[in-house]
Amino acid sequence: MITTPQSTMNSQSELDLAPLYRQLRLVPDALQNILERMFLQDSTASDIPFLCHYVDNYLMQLLCLSEDTDSVLQKLSLSDLDSPSKVCGKVWYSGNIFYRCRDCQMSLSSAVCVDCFDEGKHEGHDYFMDKSVCGGACDCGDSTSWIASGFCAEHKGIDENARTPPEVHLPEPHETLLTIILRFLIKSSTTVWLVETETDSSSSCREILRSVGLFLSKLVSRGGPLRQAVIYHCFFPEFVECCLTVICSCEGSIGEGWANTLLAMCVEHSFKRLLAPSYVKFYPLMAKNLACSTLGVGNTLSGAMDKVSLKSV
């Protein structure tokens, strides 16, 4: 018998997931059933704060096997794989420092992070340091945004003609756990939580969606193989439409994590191609939200949405 953590739903104590994982022995259906029971079948509106807590903590602990999450995520983002990240894509937020270089940028929105600028070749260039107001992502390695001669030594650029992302797998058991967790979160967000935002429990479901978006953004913001693995496993239109639906339909900062997730994933050219048709479909609503944000009467996503807009065209 597999013991589920459901009995701890009313306690925010940390979970010992190692015994659970050993019992599962990487049986995907068993783990999928446990997640569905915890988050969907046995939960009520009063459980929402704890469900949000478990999205933030339980799933991250599960992915990291109850080890220190920061060290495990750092290890996964720096794994020595055959296909290292060829684009930086580091996401920064309001108040962070970044660089622009008029000799290297391909558009007025192009920019690179401090690390890539320091390792690049910008001697004698017309460059300047800037402080972010709404956030952004590093374009080093992206030849559609930054000229190749300005790339740093670590990011040499990607195949612009690729139609699918490179097949990147994390070391086991993290690869299997990541696959199950992503499949569960995307399916639940699309078929349950987004649908229920139209009912009386809308505010509660939106809080769960906020937690899911922040969870996803934490993964992709690490960069490297971890980000590439998420892109590979989320490379389908339903994921893109789920992200855009949350961004456009949920007020406040609910969709901020989802927008930052898309922004980080747009370093992969094939993902930008996947995003473009759905972005065109959602553009009227997104433009309305951007206008409302600019006027100060809408949500707080204007910066992230604007960056996604620039990355998707």
Image: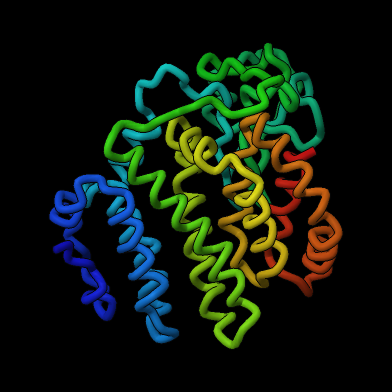
In the displayed structure, would residue 175 be above or below residue 116?
Answer: below
228 vs 39: above or below: above
**Residue 156 at what x, y percent from top left?**
58, 15
Residue at 62% x, 31% y is: 268
Residue drawn at x 39%, y 61% is: 56
Image-based side of 302 in relation to 169, left or right? right
Residue 21, horizontal then vertical, whole percent: 20, 51
On the image, which quarter does residue 122 sit in? top right
Q: In this orientation, which residue lies closer to the viewer: 47 or 37?
A: 37
Relative to 182, residue 119 above or below: above
Say whether residue 54 is left or right of residue 280: left
Figure label count: 0
Q: What colour scheme was applied to this rendering of the protein?
A: rainbow
Quarter residue 103 falls in: top right
Q: Specify the quadrant of the image occupied by residue 202.
A: bottom right
Identify which residue is drawn at 48% across, 64% down: 211
List x then y, in percent, for residue 304: 68, 52
Q: Quadrant of the C terminus?
A: top right
Which of 230 and 108 lies nearest the eye of the viewer? 230
Q: Quadrant of the N terminus?
A: bottom left
Residue 79: % across, % down:
35, 27
Q: Nearer the viewer, residue 142 or 250?
A: 250
